[in-house]
Image: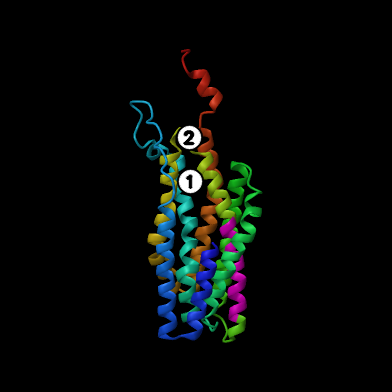
Amino acid sequence: MPGLAVGAALGGLALTLNTRTAFLVVFAIDAVSFLLSALALRRLPAVAASPRGPSGEPALAVLRDKPYTLVTFLNTIMLFYMPLLSLVIPLWLVQRTAAPHWMVSALLVLNTLSVVIFQVRVASRVTGLTSAARSVRLAGIAMLAACAVFALSSLGSSAWLAGLVLLAGAVLQVIGEMMLGAGSWEIGFDLAPAGKQGQYQGFFGTSTAIARMAGPLALTTLIITWGTPGWIVLGVLFLLAGTAMGPAVRWAERTRVPAAVRLSADPVR
């Protein structure tokens, strides 16, 4: 996260200078940062593979777990917030608002610093599946409010007013982001069987990949093409997905066999 803040600040500086040299220097710094990260990752120790499951067990049991699949689907919809700050809002800011272009970097820095400072405090309120589902529901409400505020940023011709409205929307968005992160992590891990964390977390992690892959196309079409109605549609989708997470989690809980029941059902060895 600090890397994102530094990168956003450098990007804002390049946008302010608006010269070819400034952009090339930022790209060069970015390339060097990837190289240094790769060298650091090579130093990580190897981890032994998990033991194989019992014979006859499905190789991908998670694909047969309908409640967990539904939870993953809802999480995917919620994660469509990710392309907002990195792609859609910058396009919206430049094309539809009077805000200064350097506000793009300011919004990224605000988001990054907020997560670094407050994410642990937000996550401390999640202590189980019930509080996790509530956190995701509140995230949906915050995301809806953020979308409504972002839509308002296109009204008027005042650069500073548009910038203040965008900042208010970014605050609501990062609040929703932190509540979603805290809730979804708890849900993803708690609902996964102890012996299948690898495949369950791999499947749950596809939410991020799908949101990053499909999000830019879907959201640019929805927001940049539709404008204000697109923001409202997106906000309602966040609200519906966040609200549906509670029933989906309760359904998944009902299908889980408690450890005590599993042990009592095992034959005496």
Say whether residue 226 is magenta.
no
Q: Label 2: state its secondary structure.
A: loop
Provide the major secondary structure of the magenta segment. helix
Q: Is residue 248 visible?
A: no
Residue 266 percent location from the top left of the image: 47, 18
Nearest the eye: 1 or 111: 1
Q: Amino acid at mark 2?
A: Pro
Residue located 40% across and 65% down the image:
218
In the shown orientation, is residue 75 left or right of residue 109?
left
Per the rendered image, the range of residues in magenta is 162-178
Tell me the residue that label 2 is attached to: 193
Residue located 60% across and 65% down the image:
113
Callout 1: few (<14), some (14-19), or many (20+) C-alpha neighbours within 10 Å? many
Residue 115 percent location from the top left of the image: 59, 60
Callout 2: few (<14), some (14-19), or many (20+) C-alpha neighbours within 10 Å? some
Nearest the eye: 21 or 91: 21
